[in-house]
Image: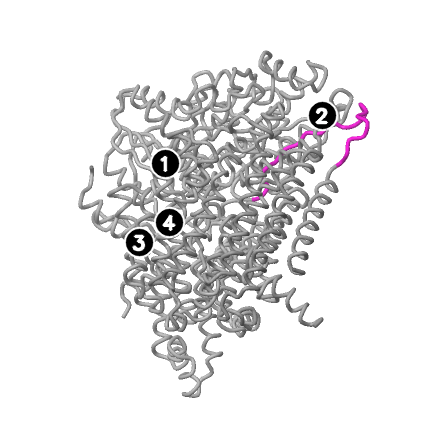
Amino acid sequence: MNMDHTTVTSGVTQTDKRRRRTTELMIAAAGILLSLLLIVVGRTYGDYFYVASYVVLQFVLLATAWNVLGGYSGYVNFGSAGFFAVGCYTTILLGKLFDAPLAVCVPAAGIVAGLIGLGTGYLSLRLRGVFFSIATLALAVMLQTLIVNWSYVGGARGVYVLRPDTSGPFDSYVQLLAIVMCLMATAAVIVAVVVERSWIGFGLAALRDDETAAEAAGVPSLRLKLIATTLSGFLMGVAGAPFPYYITYVDPASAFSLAIAINTIAMPLIGGTATWWGPVVGALLLGITQQVLTVTISSAANLLIVGVLLVIFVAVAPNGIVGLVRKFRESRR
Amino acid sequence: MSKNDFTINRREALAGIATAALTAGSIVPASAQTQQPIRIGMGMAMTGGLAALGKSALLGMQIWKDDLNARGGLLGRKVEFVTYDDQSSPAVVPGIYSKLIDIDKVDLVVSGYATNQIAAAMPTIMQKKRLFMTLFGLAANDQFKYDRYFQMQPNGPDARMEFSRGYIETAMAMNPKPKTIALVGADAEFPNIALDGARENAKKAGLKIVYDKMYPPNTIDFGTIVRSIKATEAELVFVASYPPDSAGMVRAAREVGLKSRMFGGGMIGLQSAALKTQLGPLLNGVVGYDLYVPEPTLKFPGIEEFLKKYQAEAAKQGVDPLGFYIAPFAYAEMQVLEQAIVAVGSLDEAKLAQHIHKASFDTVAGTIKFQERGEWAEPRVLLVQYQGVTGNDVEQFKQTGRQVILHPPKYKSGDIKAPFGD
Amino acid sequence: MYVTWDLMANAIVAGILLGGFYAAVAVGVTIAFGMLDIVNIAHPAVMMIGAFLAYLALNTFGIDPMITMVILAGVGLAIGPFLYRGYHALIEKRGDESLQGLAFFFGILFIVEIGLVMTFGVDYRALELSYLSKTFELGAVSIPARMLIPFVVAMIMCGLCYAYLFYTFTGRTILAVAQDVEAVRLIGADPQRSKSVAFSIAIATGLVAGVLLILIQPVEPSIGREFIGRAFAVCVLGGIASITGTVTAAMILGVAETLTASLIGPSWSPAISFGLLLLTLAFRPSGIFGR
């Protein structure tokens, strides 16, 4: 069953390090290539391509962020939409207070969401398994109630966020958003690789397999969990930061959206949670499918397909696409 | 190494698939011959919370399209719709409108139902400088100030105040004059705005606000809220709510035995057949804003034929069988577009926008003139009171005298029955 | 402020009635999640099925919801074992992956919701029954039948569950399964069978709770989601695997919500219930009544 983690305790060797560096370079190159591709293809297909790419890449970022905690340590965050919304509202607040540009809002959103992540990390001291998940769900509801009652950032009524004029080399603001999201998603995937292949990842995997035993063996469980929750929160906040400019009108219902909560969990599960590329594949697959279905089938069946895919994958391929690929390779060996 | 190669290949492959899928769905306009149909694109809520009204609106538009094509079309061309389901979710709206404009290359775009959807489409529309006819956006253009935006809900230039204006004016005309008012509503977009306006209208009228609270969406127990209001002995109770809580508030008011002189005001949902039939006689005495009711004072040319067609078709499709709320305005929206295109003689959107700003339009929803932000120059939000409702039959709501217009005076069709509690 | 004793008394009574309904929703979660470790977040979807079947029964066949709920309880008990077998074969027998179970039920929740949307549409549906709009006056306190009937049914249902679990052999094996599966095997009972029975009870209570919901308020397919948080909150507050704890916690939550609504303002009541949950989780993870 836990074939994926047999190397867990072997530590970080020289080859591992070299392998990691190569992977990082490859991902960075792929990300930059994809950004260029976006620009080139976008010229032909117009803004629709940017809008669709933005949404899909946002899910790549969210799924990767979720997986840093959920996949590597086994602590399931149900409140992803809460972290996403915190990022989103940080942008709104900074915009209202200082007219802050996106370049300031993104890191700020990450920091605020990261701090909340740190808080949930302390929760994990006492809460394991499903209880942790329920606590994160409760946290998201609390955050939503807070926002609903905070009229400065729009409250329940929502708030309009006007896009700044397009500047610099960009044709349109959507293009800028898509490329920003592409770079952020690339960075997040690199972070995931670094975490996965460093002592943090090995430690987290040990916690996932048996927390008590890992603690007994001297794994610094609290420190590891705090790193994972903070990092995961940070990345989710970052994902939410450009959202107000994408949607232009934000109300609590669209920031704390169920679609975000569901997709953020479903995508890594369908892709596979054990490695960094599971959530990426899951997000691309599910994200693109949803984009295509929205403009083709265009009915309730659209969401039905997400549900059915999720059930099928969980039932038939519990380790996601990653698991399927591994099985396929092993059978060839 | 090999794993990495694989991933990148996969990523490129997926991008390729996406690109292919995007192009496959589109129809490439060949050398634009005049015989090609005029294509009008929109995203519309066909699933999710807004779908009930979204479908009703779409049906209204389709009836216009069929009427028009039967008459020979527009500028000698047939009209076609390109519609996508926005799933009641604003997040998919930017994608839909970019696709409509960039890939489908539709000739004109109109909005889907409700404010969030309209706002989410605005940046795309504005960047492409398209004409945008919108349906039921609550002051959505106040921030954007886009000059090719036209909105069909008859809220007028100061939407906030209109949902309570009729209520307060009718109340202040009662003898003796009421002194106290309770304000209550759901904590969400529309109720917030409506209550804001009610607060101001009440203050202007010299009413004392004795209760002013919001409840969260998805509240189950309204009895507690109504009881708190009852304890304040407010003479007037103004409620701003969404469909499920509109029903909840009316029921709770009956159960608690609320005895205020007026009850209701800004309740969304009472306009649809679903809630009218569910509540039946519980509605008697309730007042609410409305946009169209079959009263003799609102006989606009064509409205009756339209409703006849609508009601016949609605029964088949399972959408709102009355079609008073949004459908006439959806039809009227397309009439405005049609009349403008005929007058301008082309699909030039700059000229169309200019023309719509200047001209006035005779539609099934009355004569419409737009002001500079694209709202109706003259607001026409009605205040109606339910009277003589018996049983839960839907047919009675098609008769006159069930939803009596109290305000504005121009369309008044009956007198208020007060107090509410009797 | 107009806080009078009448108002307080009414708020508390309304809270208890509301709490009764919450108990009906949460008891199924307590059994499935608390006792069997099945993270059935699709429980609210089961409720929605119950609610729409009650609607269908009344409007197509003229069957009163009071009868429908008894029939549905029977149906739930009858099909429950098959559902459990399916879940066991697909997920449970693979072992400790509770995350997989979670995702599985997440998917089911969605499928049921969309299924209902495609069959019944997205309109709000309600039941029209004259006896629901009656109100009883008890001194200054008024009790609407719309809330009283669900409360009574919920109490009977929770009572039956309690009696079954504590006074029958199978019931006790279910309680034992919650503690220690191996021990159950040792006394010669089949833990699989106990779990299957318990899961069926959970499904049956979910269907009945759905009928109660449509008695209380109009229902549309996606409304079920609202109850995921509350149901699990009640279950955890009550100490996860305790029926009496669940009922008490549901009442506390109900009263907390109605009191907040009358004293502070309704818009803060969700924060109260979930704040209570977070505090409990942080300081007493075994629940208010936990050992």
Residue B38 counted in the magenta span? yes
Disc 3 + disc 2, Cβ < 8 Å: no
Q: Residues within 10 Å of mark 1 (few under 14, many from 20)?
A: many
Question: Measured along the vertical axis of the image, is residue A136 above or below residue C196?
Answer: above
Q: Secondary structure at mark 2?
A: helix
Callout 3: chain: C
Foreground disc of the pair 2, 4: 4
The image's mark for residue A116 is 4
Q: Which residue is mark 1?
A: B185
Q: In front here: C166 or C271?
A: C271
What residue appears at the point 26 percent right and 28 percent down from the top-left corner? Answer: B209
Q: Which residue is mark 3?
A: C254
Q: Residues within 10 Å of mark 2 (few under 14, many from 20)?
A: some
Q: CA distance from mark 1 to mark 4?
A: 31 Å
The magenta-colored residue range is: B27-47
Foreground disc of the pair 4, 3: 4
Q: CA distance from mark 3 to mark 2?
A: 56 Å
Query: What's the amino acid at mark 1?
Result: Gly
Q: Which quadrant holds residue C4?
A: top left
What residue appears at the point 35 percent right and 20 percent down from the top-left corner? Answer: B169
Foreground disc of the pair 1, 4: 4
Question: Residue A289 in the image: x percent, y percent?
Answer: 64, 49
Q: Residues within 10 Å of mark 3 (few under 14, many from 20)?
A: many
Callout 4: chain: A
Q: Left or right: where does residue A220 sit relative to residue B392?
A: left
Q: CA distance from mark 3 to mark 1?
A: 21 Å
What residue appears at the point 29 percent right and 48 percent down from the top-left corner? Answer: C258
Residue A184 counted in the magenta span? no
Question: Measured along the vertical axis of the image, is residue C219 above or below residue B68?
Answer: below
